[in-house]
Amino acid sequence: MSASAPGSGHSADPNLVLTLVYFLTIAAIVVGTAVYFVVMARITDPEVRLMELITTQREVQHLIDNLSSQFSNFLRLPLRWRAMKPYYTHHTLSWIFILALAASVIVLVVGLALSLAEVARISTLTYVVSLNALFMVRQHLYYVRRTYLTYDAEHYLVLDTTKFYYFDWSVFNVVQIGILVIEFLQLLSFPIRDLLDAFHIAKNKELEGGGDGSDTASFIIGIITMFANLSSKFYVIQFWFLVSAIACVALVMAAIHTYNAWRPHRPLSLYWVKYLLPLANLLYLPMLVMLIGSAACLSKIGTEDYKDSSSGLLRCDDPSVLKPLYLALTVVAYTVGYVILTTFVTSFDRIPIRGEIHYKSQGVAFLKNMSMLLSIVFLLVANSYRHIRSILSLVIVGAMVCFNISTQPCFVEQINYWRTYGLCCILWVALIVTMLTNETSTLSNTGIGGVASALA
């Protein structure tokens, strides 16, 4: 590690600034959400408030029923061929991905035990991709069979036929638009980070230490997208923060389920769960992508990618980090967090009021899962396969564009237009990045200004 330049002793550490912004942003969002709903509860008329609570409790109960149905559908896999009828394809693919999961876990344990860095990296990638593919297959089966699982065909018929052309500028809609913009920037950051990383490598081949501009740009991207690019000394703090948060969520869900099963006639009031949905949607990608970044960093220790790349969202080379322990905990935390968060954000299927920005749960499921696949491709696929990584990103974003156009996942058509336009912008950037990263010599001669001109 190079020494600091003279006179820079009083300058702020960018990693420390980014760490503070990351945690303060999360704290501000949580506190702001709580304060907003407390204030609204105080200024609302008691009779109106009572009606809202009754409606919210009904909606939350429907969400809990959907959660239960999704978990039941995810866990119940028939073994006999006759029992798979008529969903042979779904169940067969599910067992294939389960076998891939089991094989990748065995290979990962062997790779960590024998300190085989490349084996650990490939098995980590296989595990994460297999888990996401398995969950996508089970969720698709859930939506195919949803009418039979929930016994509420009329409700879903209304959802499939509801459509609005305009939306109101209410506080709820403003929050939804803000989340939409942040998600757009988060997805856009992946191809841009890949381009900055390729530019950094190309410059370093000609001039030692020629990646400062890339580091500055990555810092700015981290601030905007809430994808913290942390140094090794902050890795342990963030890692245990994420693991603790996911463990607390899992324990709370288990405690509530146990209590309600123990006292079914006096269940806990869970109307407050509805207010966690915007928070879960906002923090969905940052939390899970940080875990993917942790897995990417740990699995690349000892490989060429770790030596020649400034990519990734984390620096995990702290001497106190025990790679086998942290990688195993990362995989477990990602598995639990991904299943819980994805199921939660895709289980809210209420009928929206006119002018309200709301999404169909199957649309949320597909776009969230494809967003995770995009992050997996950019963070876990090796730099030696950069061209394949770029092509896969084009396929994923192209699938998101086609899905958004064909299914119209938002009940408000204006939002569908905006989202399609945003995804097309990401597709365009990914295409330009694919073309520019074909030759590192081109990047070394282009410079950041030339790259910006190409993207424009």
Image (cartoon, rainbow, N blue to C red):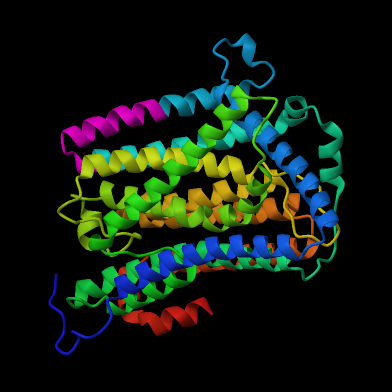
Residue 263 sits in which quadrant? top right
Please give the count of numbered marks on the rendered protein.
Answer: 0
Q: Residue at x 14, y 88 (%)?
A: 6
Whether residue 77 can be seen here: yes
Whether residue 395 can be seen here: no
- Residue 25 position, x and y percent, is 47, 67
Magenta span main SS: helix
Residue 147 sits in which quadrant? top right
Furthest residue in direction bottom, as rendered: 7
Q: Which residue is drawn at 72% across and 63% down?
A: 42
Viewer-proximal residue among 245 and 413: 245
Q: Does the magenta stretch include residue 375?
A: no
Q: Which residue is drawn at 39% across and 64% down?
A: 228
Residue 446 sits in which quadrant? bottom left
- Residue 186 position, x and y percent, is 51, 63
Point out the stretch of residues depicted in magenta.
101-118
Q: In this view, does 297 lie to the left or right of 97?
A: left
